[in-house]
Amino acid sequence: MIGLPGLAGSKKNRRDGVATDIALRCTGVSKSFGDSIAVSDFDIEVRRGQILALVGPSGCGKTTVLRLIAGLEALDSGQIEIGGKVVASEGRHTGPDKRSVGIVFQDYALFPHMSVEANIGYGLDRKGRSERVQEVLELVGLEGLGKRLPSELSGGQQQRVALARTLASRPDVLLLDEPFSNLDAGLRERVRVEIREILKTAGTTTVFVTHDQQEALFMGDLVGVQVGGRIEQVDIPERVFHRPATPFVARFMGTADFLPVEPNGNRLVTEAGPARAVPGFQPPESAPLEVMARPDDFVIAPSEDGQGVVMDRVFQGWAYTYEVELDSGLRIHCQMPHLLTIEVGVRVLVNLRRDHPQMFYSNGVASPEVPRYGYLNERQSTGSPNQAPGGAV
Amino acid sequence: MTAERVIDTRIAAGRGASWTPRRLLPRWLRREPVWLWLAGFAVAGAAALPAVYLAVRAADSGDTAIDAIFDPDTVSMLWRTLQLIFLVTLGSVLIAVPLAWLTVRTDLPYRRAWAVASVLPLAIPSYVGALAFISAFGPRGLLQGWLEGPFGVERLPNLYGLTGAAVVLTLLSYPYVFLTVRATLWRLEPEMEEASWTLGRSPWQTFRRVTLPLLYPAIGAGALLVALYTLSDFGAVALLQYDTFTRVIFNEYNTSFDRAGAAALSLVLLGVAVALIMVEASARRRARYYSGANAARRDRRTVRLGRWRWPASAFAGVVTFLALGVPIFVLAYWLVRGIGAGETGLFDWTAAYNSIRYSLAAAAATVIAAVPISVLSVRRPGLLSAALERFSYVGFAMPGIAVGLGLVFFGIRYATDIYQTAYLLEFAYVVLFLPVAVGLIRASLLQVNPRMEEAAMSLGRSRANAFLTITVPIIWPGLAAAGIMVFLLTMKELPATLILGPIDSSTLATSIWTAAEEAFFARAAAPSLVLVLASAAPMTFLVLRERSTR
């Protein structure tokens, strides 16, 4: 397991009595249902006002994490702190009604027998209720619809009511479970822009669960990639995309091909030409090394002397994605502008772009190693910005 | 392939053959074989017949009928009936809602067994329940007998009249509410309650403000069934001597032969039933919000009862003891005593044979009659098929005694050949139990994707052939369930059987009734036990199956 200097460090801070701006912290949280392990050794730390997008394949325990944080499930081991207070640890469980956590369910779970206003005011005390309801209605842009029943609203509006109902009582942490999965594609993009704005305006700490990488990249201040019940990597979206800690993260965040690398002096030779690394990169001694390349990291050109053959071509409007089989039998994906059309079966010369450094992997982890909790290091040790290949950070 | 079949297939495949002579027919007739619509009309008309003839008979007698309706006696009878309905419905809700919640949501010990036990009272015909209560708690009953020796108790609180009728009917009909509430509790999305908890509300506040309001439609639907059951009940009120509509109508018809009066009162009775249905329907329209949620995707949180499981178990135990234990114990007691005393004629095999014969015929006829209307209402939703379906529900609103009387009038006037034969009786059963069969068959038809039949037709099968080879095998369980339900209901049916049954041909129900009227408990015991056990078996099965389908 990779060390978590950030987690350990901030815990120490708190013991020293220094005020913490950590809204949510999970440490070693585990939960099984019968024989199946849903969450194991799960660690996360979210600062006030941050949006964490948890993304992972279905069945990776994302929703269970939310339910554990909300208090709808009791954890087996580990600890959950909200706003500096321990709400769950082994043998200790604060009920969902006693935690300051709001959850927006996948299908909203609006109370069908109550008006929009009554739904939003449901968790509020009588005093100041109507003012707060109006305030929140305004925040989510539903002024004037307060008297309607949920069944009289569109899907997007219901979604905003669900959000408003949760925001109304100003929870320390807001949880969103696949909030856009019930909306159709066109609406989804618009709604997620709106929701992000609302969350940022409200300044609410949010944990957001999705299986859609694009959504995670867009919504999250932090993106956590979860697999097999634990966090594989969590960092700012750009770094998760460009500096995946493991090949799994690389593949999950988008198409990725891996080419074996042959170090030759200070040159890193691959079947698609030399690869570029960050300055000072030391390839590991006597371990297989691979370079990760996204479709836009390749350039192809028709050539009789090429080392690959186009096997398939997918038209995407603004570009073509070619699938090319290299002479070694390895298949790579390459995105090229639509200006050039190469027919299937044509021999091509394949080269890695050399305008930015690539990521390298050895034995299932990045080389040099990428911290799984990169954002914590950054905050702890000021001054040493991460070297980010791709320069996208 | 005949030309006709080609056209059929094309229409079915949505390609639309435009030159067919069928174009001359109105669109709705073109789309479905005419015979299906004709069958639907015939069945709906038959179902409406008893009600129509009651009205005709009442109208014929003119002033007599009007006098009967506005008679002060009628008003006080209406008041008595409504009182009974109110008490039974209220009692059922108060018993059933906590029981349903306990057996679905809590860790009540043996909750599955309690769930089965809480449904089984439906297997007890009201006249059997009343009989058992009279025998157990009535004057000179078993309880008084036991108390007299050691304690010198010579009188128990009076069982007859409103109290007894309300208690007996409540204990026998609360399962209707129990079943509807239970089904909704299973379906209720756990997220509703979870949302309420995360918004800071305690479990009790959540129950009161979220769960209970979401149960109102189910409670309403169950309460309607209880109210209609109470309104149409004849056996229990007659034995417990509480003068409601059914008892008075029967007496007027049977003893004073005042047919116009009986017809008029039956119409009032029908009116009350329709009013009850409308009250529930309008309440439901206001509460339409409950949008058929999916079955819960994961097991919901179970409420831990802790120390409360003792009073909870006691509650379930007392209800089960009274509703199930007392009748079975009393019946068994009398049977054993009768056998011990060497009495003969404890079980009338001819009556049992008649019961089974009539019930089998009723089950087959009702299922066959229910198919066209079910198919039309599912596959051709529209005003006309909705109207047909509505008509088939007449039996739901019409007490057995009213159906019986309506058919008596019809038989005497137009069908003397079948009057007082089993045919007219079967007709009454079909009218009475058609709604049950339509409901069950509709539900199973709704699960058949019509595209499957269309696929069969595109492969060259005729519409009828596709229905028989594709749809029928799939809805078979629904048809079987409908048949079984009608069979059981027919076995227990009393008032229509009394009025319409062929002379000198008794059934289990009528022989129990005769024995009960004469307080000949030993002779009522064996047929009652047979009826109860025969109905209990499939009900147990239905409740247990609930788990696998939830």
Image (tube, coloured by chain):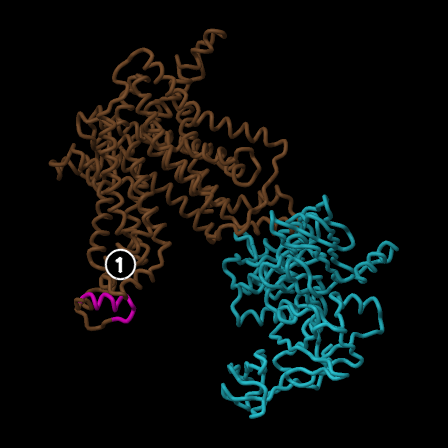
Chain colours: A cyan, B brown
Q: Residue furthest left?
A: B417
Q: Residue furthest right?
A: A16
Q: Residue furthest bottom?
A: A304
Give how far across and how far down residue A83 sits, in percent: 76, 55
Quadrant of res B402: top left
- Image coordinates for residue A292, horizontal then vertical, percent: 66, 76
Q: Is residue B496 left or right of residue A97?
A: left
Q: Is residue B223 left or right of residue B265?
A: right
Image-based side of B185 in relation to A222, left or right: left
Q: Is residue B218 above or below residue A156?
A: above
Label 1 amino acid? Ala
- Nearest the camera: A210 or A333? A333
Q: Is residue A126 visible?
A: no
| Depth order, front residue of B336/A371 | A371
Residue sitting at x 54%, y 70%? A187
Give the image quarter of residue B211: top right
